[in-house]
Structures are given as C-alpha cells and as structure tokens.
Amino acid sequence: MYGNHTNIFNHINSKMKKINCFIPFQDETQVKLTVDNLKAQKLVNKVYLLHAGETAYKAAEVLGCEVINVPYLNSTTAVKAIASKADATYTLIYTKYTSLSFVLFSLERMVSIIEDSGSAMVYADHFNQVGDVRTDAPVIDYQFGSLRDDFNFGSVLFYKSDAVKEAVSRMDIDYKFAAMYDLRLKVSQKGNLEHINEFLYYDVETDTRKSGEKLFDYVDPKNRAVQIEMEQACTEHLKAIGGYLKPQFKDVKFAEDHFEYEASVIIPCKNRVRTIKDAITSALSQKTNFKYNVIVVDDNSDDGTVDIIKSFKENEKLIYIAQDKSYHAIGGNWNVAIHHPKCGKFAIQLDSDDVYSDEHSLQKMVEAFYEQNCAMVVGTYRMTNFNMETIPPGIIDHKEWTPDNGRNNALRINGLGAPRGFYTPMLRTINFPTTKYGEDYAVGLRVSREYQIGRIYEVVYLCRRWEDNSDSSLAIEKVNTHNTYKDRLRTWELKARVAMNRK
C-alpha cells in the first residue's frame, strides 16, 4: 500500500516538473546559487549549463547539471542546443552570469500567465541587486515595432518549448551573436511576447553605467561584427512579416522650388543661458557659397537666454522667434521655424547646447543633398563634455547605415545621428510631432519610407553631454517612457510599410 502511494506521488510530482532551465556557466562558484535556487523550484525539471568558449569544459556534469559546450552564448549553435534539450513544456533561459533568485511562486505565476494569455513567451518586472541595495527594475510592453536588439526583457526569458522548437526549425542562417535576437523575432511572428508587470525575481546588476553611457553601445566600433548580424536578423524578420522596403526611392526635384535662402540653421531652445551664445556664434560663423540664415526659436526661457539671443540682433542673418505660452516642445518649435516665410530650402539642425565642428559644416551638409539626391542628410558627430573635450564613445558615425538597407535598419536602432538636415518642402508635408523627445527619430523614419537619407561620414558636429541633458543619467522609469514612445513610433511606421507593400 505504501509503495502505491509513493508511485502516485512520484507521478504527480513528475507532471509538475514542467520547466527546463538554461543558464550561462563559467565555473561552479558562479552558478551554484542560481542552480540551488532553480532546483528548489517545484516546477523545474532539469537545469543545463551553457559554457561558451573555444575550449570545451570537460566535466559532463556540474552540481548535477549537464554542461553544454557552445562557441558563443548567443550563437545559432547555442539556440539549437537549447531547442534539442527543451523536452519539458516550458523553457527558461537566464541571460546573465550573475545569481538569480525568485519571489515566492513566481514560476507558477509565469506558467499561469503564459497559459491564460496564450502567449509564446513571457517576461517580467524584477529587482536589481547591487551590493546591499535593491532597486525596482520594471520593463516595458512588447509591441509590433519593438525591433531593437537591445530591447530589455530582463534576464529571464520564459518560452513555451514548442514555440522555441518551431522557431529553430526556421533558422537557416548561422549566427555567432544574433541567434537569441533571431529566436525572439521568429517566435514573435507566430505568437505574442507578454509582459508580466509584476516583480517576480532578483538579479544582480553588473553594468552600473549611467543610462547616457549605455546609449551608444550599438555604435561602438568593437561591436560592429555584432551589429552586422543584428541587422541581418532584423532584415530577415522584416521580409517575413512584409515590412521590408527595397532600395527604391523617390527622386527629389530641387530645381522646382524657389527660396530666398538656400539654407536655414534651426536652433530651438529653452533655458540654455550657458550654451546658446556658443551655438549661435557657431551658426553665424559658417562660410558658404550660398545665402543662409539662422532661425532661433525660444520657448519661453526665463534664465537670461533671451537676452543673449537679442545681443545678436544687429546680425542680419539672425531671425528670432519668441513662442507664445502654449505647449510647443522641441517638435513644435521646429514646426514654427520650417514654416517661417524666411526658412531656406534646406533646414539644418543645431541644438542649443551644441556647435558645428568647424566653419564648413553647413556647406558640407547642403552639398550632400545634391550629391546624393536625398530629402534628408545625417552627419557624423563627436561626443564631448561641457568643455568640448572628447568623451567616450567619441565619434558617432552610424556606419551601420547603408544606402541599400539603411531605411530598414532604421527600425532596429534608436537613433539616426546628427546633425540632421531636411529638404524643407518635403518636411513641411510631414512636420514634427509636438514632443520633446524622439521628434527627430519620428521624422527620420517617415522620410526613409519614401526617400533616400544621405550620410556624411566625417565629423561636422560636436555634441555636448552634460548632467541635465535628456539622456545623460535617467531614472529607469524615464528610460522606459522614452523607449516605449520610440517603439510606438516604430510600430506605426512598420504598420504603414506593411500596408504599403500590400498595395
């Protein structure tokens, strides 16, 4: 009788064990706490250790876990190895080398939500542990346009195993770095990726850089090989969902439009008393073979900025626009400038805390329009501190942009570069969204749907980063707000492209 009860219990217990787990492995010390925490969970069936490197880890088991040797953690080889071992209902992939622990019944909650929602994958808010300090680490909802390869799911990816296997069956490109990205893109083609806005686990944050220091990781030269693969994976995804655009562009007929000025430097500003003089001086110092002006739009500054602007009133090139008290933001200030009757044929950006790299930048920007027959031009810039001293990552040239595929890759990255210049008649038909963040990216996406965007790969702009810059050091809630908005922009644009391709 006792034996029968044992058998029944074992049968029930085996049916509960629904999750196979895969965690990165360096050594026993590094994984022990994570392994112990996973094995303490009633729903966990097996734990596998993924060891990456040229030298295979010789031990068959560590802490009772099978070791799987792969060349790179984010490789197609690794993802296929995971799929081959995914013989439980669910697959949990942990993406950090640090320790993982769980809120009580969190795995049960993930199982419940993934089943109730009918999703292919779920991910959750969590806590970051840095030393003795625990902080909230909320993440954001996944959207149709959430194509960034650095989209923050947190460190725990919880998939239905069938979804993983189905996606892997369609992997026909061998990646070193982009396979995890490829996996979630392919899974998203067949099912939903569901955000559980509940705090379900703890992990240790090892990247303690400020948000502004992380912002440009994707253009770091050392990451170039990674970016090439990410672009390829994203492009294949766009083709699969009908959002890919071929390198076919509308011609720009510059001769059909008459303007008094060939170009206008547009400087929107608000409370930039420390920098506006440098910006205006830089703009007025440009040497060109064409007629240009400088349009400064002040959005109700109250710190002395207006007095500095008015100190240039004797310069006939300067046009000063004082906004009324209604809401404008950066996008609204741009709209006022480009619709001004004195705006030139080309509207060229200069932020109120930045300067051009030399006196020839404006000339180079305008020449690029004609040479590349484009409706928008994006230059190259150098990151500096407030004192104009170069700071990491240094030069931002956005070489990930290519004439053939830039318009598609623009959906994957979070920015297009600076300075930005626009063909004014085209821009007047689009206009900027009235926002104070992402307005330039929104316009860039819209332009790239129809027109070629030209590039200048030499430094024409110095971008100052100082403590109160919009991206310098932001709370996670603000970062999430920014990323949610840009994902929304990508979603709208992607839907428009899919619809356009169906016509």
Image: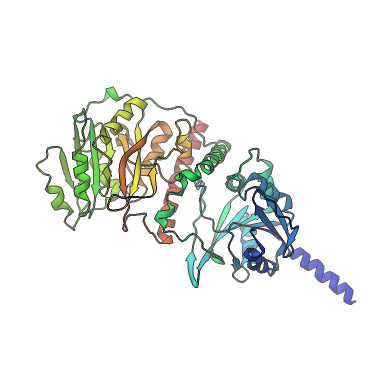
The reply, left or right, for residue 453 in relation to residue 424 is right
Residue at horizontal 21 percent and vertical 54 percent from the top: 274
State the residue in front, 502 or 320: 320
Residue 17 location (% of width, % of height): 73, 64
Residue at horizontal 81 percent and vertical 66 percent from the top: 11
State the residue in front, 114 or 462: 462
Q: Residue 288 sits in which quadrant? A: top left
Q: Residue 44: in sight, yes or no?
A: yes
* Furthest residue in direction top, as rendered: 255
Residue 473 location (% of width, % of height): 38, 59
Asked which colour scheme the image uses, the reply is: rainbow
Residue 354 location (% of width, % of height): 27, 47
Residue at horizontal 58 percent and vertical 45 percent from the top: 177
Relative vertical location of residue 338 with respect to residue 370 in this rendering, above or below: below
Is the N terminus in the top left, top right, bottom left or bottom right quadrant?
bottom right
State the residue in front, 320 or 326: 320
Relative vertical location of residue 10 with respect to residue 347 in this rendering, above or below: below
